[in-house]
Image (cartoon, helix red, strand yellow):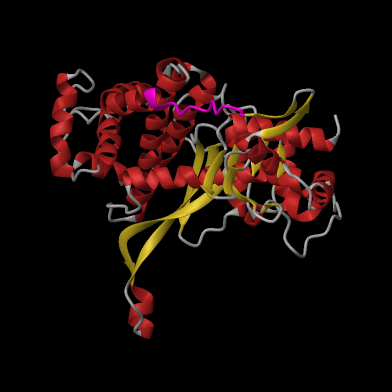
Amino acid sequence: MNMEDMRAKKGLLLNSQGAVTKVESGTYAVKSQTGIGVYKVENKVKWECTCPDHIKREQDCKHIYATKYYIGIEQVTDAGVETTKIPLTYKQAWTAYNQAQKEEVRLFDALLKDLVGAIPEPVQVGAGRPRLSIRETLFCSIQKVYSQLSSRRAYSLFKNAIEKGQIAHAPHFNAPSKLLNNPDITSILRNLIHITAIPLASIEKDFAPDSTGFRTTSFGAYCEEKHGGKKEHKWLKAHIMSGIKTNIITDAIITDGDGADSPQFKPMVLNTAQSFDISEVSADKGYSSRENHDVVGEVGGTAYIPFKDNATGQAKGSPLWKKAFHFFKLHQEEFDEHYHKRSNVESTISAVKKKFGECLKSKNHVAQVNELLCKLIAYNITVLIHEMFENGINPDFLHLNSSPCTQITPKPSI
């Protein structure tokens, strides 16, 4: 099959997926093959498309073919010229979405109870007042972050959890906030993110990293006092690795607002590879380095990262860098199809902020980091609930937590 036939076949597939929409007479919007981004196709003087393939070749691309299938293709037959209309068959999974939304609150608490079930409880030495259960207090902490209620208003949720048998004792309304001030909880929360992602290991093969800021209630006073500058909020930066299909977060690292992106790439790839078979990792130019290409290769995947303008194809000890550089230069359209998958991580970030807000309520740094991790855990649980209805996923946290490779222990991740 030659390249033109391949483009025509891809165009037929795009049309069958409902990728073409009429904007006005002679103008159409066509989604990219990855579903990320839209190209404008026009048929006024001649066929034109805004995609790189058409601009470079000035010939019909798959988006133009898709539009031709959408409006009907003229075919020459013995009976004359016939036009065949290709029906649109793409359908949104609204049934699964609606069911997940209706059942989310009920299932969230049930899954959260199982998730924290394997957190080790410290042994109390000597007499004295019994310690609060870490797993139950952490249950309340994540439940409070999910609800976005204040500590006092969230207390009624803790009482409801007792009635449902999810916890045995409702802690003081301040106890969840105090627990988040414990730096030992950070590694536990990060492990919980890994655990919530594992049920989707059979679905996710392609991943994308990115970072985003979350505003705190703390202020940077130095600039104001020294230079009379405006009072500004401090920010924390969440570096996440997200699955492309379901938008599940497989790993997260929290840094100060000015934390660099590239150094977080390697540990997130390695941590993700502990539970997922990585095929592709798509990232923006900020992650472009020989080390980052090599680490993806080490776990059996391929990195699709654009090269900076001053980059060269010299290997300098990294054959993967040289190979990727020449692929980037010589096969731009094919590279873009892989690279544009990274836009899905932006959807992940948007979903987290829309659902749980971009402001952190905690007052000190440790609690702010832990609160942000709780947001990401809560988000992952909501993703799993949706996948339960759309793909029949059955999260079994109790089984996962009993496995030595996923045992929740207060130890740092990579």
Q: Is residue 71 left or right of residue 6?
A: left
Give coordinates of residue 174: x percent, y percent.
18, 43
The quadrant holding residue 307 is: bottom right
Asked if the stretch drawn in magenta spans residue 344, the answer is no
**Relative to the observer, which residue lies in front, 408 or 333?**
333
- Give the residue at x 81% y 44%: 320
Residue 341: tell me if it is visible: yes
- Give the residue at x 18% y 46%: 150
Residue lying at the far bottom in this picture: please name it.
227
- Give the residue at x 37% y 76%: 222
Locate the C terminus by quadrant. Answer: top right
Count up the numbered dots: 0
Q: Which portion, as a residue range, is magenta?
A: 85-95
Q: Is residue 390 left or right of residue 16?
A: left
Locate the N terminus by quadrant. Answer: top right
- Give the residue at x 33% y 23%: 99
Q: Taking 18 as reference, is 283 above or below it?
A: below
**Relative to the observer, which residue lies in front, 121 or 319?**
319
The quadrant holding residue 115 is: top left
- For the stretch drawn in magenta, what is the main secondary structure? loop
Residue 128: tell me if it is visible: no
Asked if the stretch drawn in magenta spans residue 94, the answer is yes
Q: Taking 261 as reference, is 168 above or below it?
A: above
**Relative to the observer, which residue lies in front, 216 or 281?**
281
Give coordinates of residue 201: x percent, y percent.
55, 24
Give coordinates of residue 178: x percent, y percent.
25, 44
Give coordinates of residue 106: x percent, y percent.
26, 23
Q: Is residue 358 left or right of residue 283?
A: left
Q: Taking 369 as reference, is 203 above or below it?
A: above
